[in-house]
Image: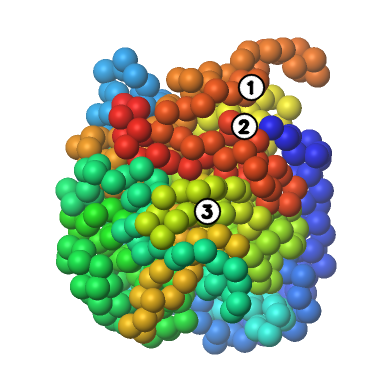
């Protein structure tokens, strides 16, 4: 398996140097606004750093510009939390697969009610409104203006030209009063650069696509025929905007495909909107996630009003704190250093640790730009800067890549290759989980930071040169693809596997790598540069029951190879065999 062409330490240093330079260039003098200057004394830093945009700087953000913030709070006793998490996923431990309830997690690890009240009181005193805390007490959301945000967090906001849009961002790091030191970890929402919706990718006109498959037919492709349906398991999706037309298409698809009518609950998270630009994507998500599962117990749509980091992290925190669904799929993605700079990446890792301790999973599209990330547009190939996408890069998220599937009209696989657009690579910022050390090419002491390999698994995504999915849009079947297809498809199959195991499998990535590692345990060897033993992937990996190894194709920089690779991860699932192999 190929290793990144340069050491991550060097790549990370170069990236952060560019970001730091951009932030310095974008600094706004104190006289830019007629607003009270904030003394640096009595303030403490947060994880929210200055943004760096490549677009033209337009000047100070208008004082009345609406700003929606999410203040991320610090959990209690993180060391104990991590130890307990590992015990929950260590066979033989008294805690093995004894998942916590949200109430138990809050009692042991959540910030205190008094800390939440201090944060809320501060926001109200600074003129913010609609101040709310998530159920797990890990985030406090509020609405204000650019002027109030600058004063409350000792920062400056500037407008930039981003393509055809104008966005704002904080060009100095966010701070909080010393009285909130150790309570607030980051201030998310001081920029409004949207995260990309990895939209359902329609087959190009005249493309040589093979037979399209309706969601239920993928059960044949991925060995799920005759397996337990997901009807005893609740699942969830991240959605945005107006869900009414999406639900109408789901009911139409259920009727046409003779699929069970799934109970649906829309959970509003924050201010809602009537935006319908993502309806086709959410048509696909809802139909694939439920029909490919053979039906589910309940579908929850955690719905936000805009695809901003501040709303996305609140959405995930709500999903986790409610603990109503076993797993959630999110067809979103953006260059990971954007989420790193505003603090979303760090905060979401804490949220996902809680999810893992409760036995929940999040599946995320690895992106449609191959080895690159979507700086400007979602192009369906490796065009852009080599970088993995967030939230798929999250340590505790399960990243779903894409394949080019060729099947017959019934769904029987003829051939499956790596898809050129499948997002993949090695994160410069996210650390790998301990459960990936036998497969991860970056799991060694050579890497000062980062090293999380993406993706974890892969399914059909190519709509043009292979087999698209047929979903109903405006009452008619449309051929679509992208990793925004593969993620809800994996969610559907995970629901089947969870149902067969009475919803006790826990974090999906831990379970999947556990199956792989039984056959291909890592090899310990000494790295000359550090003089210490490390674990490296097994040479000449053997076939794994339940995982179809994809060995041909690439996403630009990385090739599909035997065993784990940075294009298709562990491979594609064979649901029946994988269900049997899971503990």
Question: Are the residues tagged 1 and 2 within 8 Å (C-beta)?
Answer: yes
Residue 133: x, y in percent? Answer: 33, 61
Identify which residue, 391 or 416, lies in the foreground. 416
Mark closer to the observer (3, 1): 3
Q: Residue 562: which disc?
A: 2
Q: Is residue 124 left or right of residue 299?
A: right
Badge 2: few (under 14), some or many (20 or more) residues near its Cα, within 10 Å?
Answer: some
The answer to whether residue 225 of the structure is visible from this angle is: yes
Pick the front one: 107 or 557: 557
Identify the element where label 2 is drawn.
loop
Q: In which quarter of the view is residue 453 placed?
A: top right
Q: Is residue 305 above or below residue 381?
A: below
Image location (x, y in percent) of residue 141:
40, 66
Seen at 62% across and 32% down, the residue is 562
Q: Which mark is residue 540?
A: 1
Task: Tell which of 324 and 70 is nearer to you.
Answer: 324
Q: Considering the numbered disc 3 on the image, is that residue within a helix, a strand or a loop?
A: strand
Within 10 Å of disc 3 (Cα), the crowding (few <14, some 14-19, many 20+) is many
Disc 1 crowd, CA 10 A, few/some/many (<14, 14-19, 20+)? few
Residue at point 78% right, 79% down?
56
Residue 362 screen position, x and y as percent: 40, 49
Closer to the observer: label 3 or label 2?
3
Name which of mark 3 and mark 2 comes first in the sequence. Answer: 3
Marks 1 and 2, how far apart at CA: 7 Å
Q: Which numbered disc, 1 or 2, marks the residue that appears first in the sequence?
A: 1
Q: Is residue 393 visible?
A: no
Residue at figure coordinates x 80%, y 39% from the top left: 5
Instruction: Name the disc covering residue 405, or none.
Output: 3
Label located before the other in sequence (3 or 1): 3
């Amino acid at each position: 398996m190929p290793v990144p062409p340069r050491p991550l330490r060097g790549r990370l240093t170069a990236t952060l140097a560019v970001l730091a330079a951009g932030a310095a260039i974008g600094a706004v003098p104190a006289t830019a606004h007629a607003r009270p200057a904030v003394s640096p004394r009595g303030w403490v830093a947060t994880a929210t750093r200055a943004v760096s945009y490549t677009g033209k700087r337009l000047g100070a953000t208008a004082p009345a510009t609406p700003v929606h913030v999410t203040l991320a709070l610090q959990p209690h006793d993180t060391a104990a939390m991590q130890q307990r998490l590992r015990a929950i996923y260590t066979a033989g431990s008294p805690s093995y697969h004894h998942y916590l309830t949200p109430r138990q997690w809050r009692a042991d690890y959540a910030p205190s009610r008094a800390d939440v009240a201090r944060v809320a009181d501060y926001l109200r005193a600074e003129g913010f409104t609609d101040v709310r805390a998530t159920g797990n007490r890990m985030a406090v959301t509020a609405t204000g203006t650019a002027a109030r945000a600058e004063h409350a967090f000792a920062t400056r906001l500037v407008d930039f030209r981003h393509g055809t849009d104008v966005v704002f961002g904080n060009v100095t790091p966010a701070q909080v009063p010393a009285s909130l030191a150790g309570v607030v970890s980051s201030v998310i929402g001081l920029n409004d650069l949207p995260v990309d919706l990895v939209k359902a990718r329609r087959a190009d006109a005249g493309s040589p696509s093979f037979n399209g498959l309706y969601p239920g037919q993928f059960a044949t492709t991925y060995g799920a025929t005759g397996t337990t349906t997901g009807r005893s398991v609740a699942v969830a999706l991240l959605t945005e905007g107006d869900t009414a037309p999406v639900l109408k298409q789901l009911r139409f698809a259920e009727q046409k495909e003779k699929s069970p009518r799934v109970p649906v609950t829309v959970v509003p998270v924050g201010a809602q909107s009537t935006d319908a630009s993502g309806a086709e994507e959410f048509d696909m998500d809802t139909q694939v996630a439920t029909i490919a599962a053979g039906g589910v117990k309940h579908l929850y749509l955690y719905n936000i009003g805009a695809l901003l980091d501040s709303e996305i992290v609140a959405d995930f925190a709500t999903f986790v704190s409610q603990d109503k669904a076993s797993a959630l799929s999110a067809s979103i993605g953006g260059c990971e250093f954007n989420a790193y700079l505003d603090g979303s990446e760090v905060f979401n890792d804490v949220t996902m640790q809680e999810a893992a301790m409760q036995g929940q999973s999040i599946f995320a599209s690895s992106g449609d730009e191959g080895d690159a990330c979507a700086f400007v547009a979602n192009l369906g190939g490796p065009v852009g800067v080599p970088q993995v996408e967030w939230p798929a890069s999250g340590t505790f998220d399960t990243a779903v890549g894409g394949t080019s599937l060729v099947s017959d009209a019934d769904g029987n696989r003829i051939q499956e290759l790596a898809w050129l657009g499948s997002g993949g690579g090695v994160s410069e910022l996210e650390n790998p989980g301990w459960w990936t050390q036998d497969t991860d090419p970056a799991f060694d002491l050579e890497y000062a930071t980062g090293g999380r390999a993406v993706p974890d698994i892969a399914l059909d995504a190519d709509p043009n040169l292979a087999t698209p999915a047929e979903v109903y849009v405006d009452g008619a079947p449309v051929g679509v693809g992208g990793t925004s297809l593969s993620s809800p498809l994996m969610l559907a199959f995970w629901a089947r596997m969870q149902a067969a195991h009475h919803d006790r499998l826990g974090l999906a990535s831990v379970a999947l790598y556990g199956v792989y590692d039984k056959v291909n345990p890592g090899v310990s060897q000494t790295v000359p540069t550090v003089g210490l033993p490390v674990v490296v992937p097994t040479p000449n990996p053997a076939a794994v029951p339940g995982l179809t190894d994809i060995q041909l194709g690439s996403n630009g920089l990385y090739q599909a190879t035997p065993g784990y690779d940075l294009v298709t991860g562990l491979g594609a699932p064979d649901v029946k065999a994988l269900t049997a192999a899971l503990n």
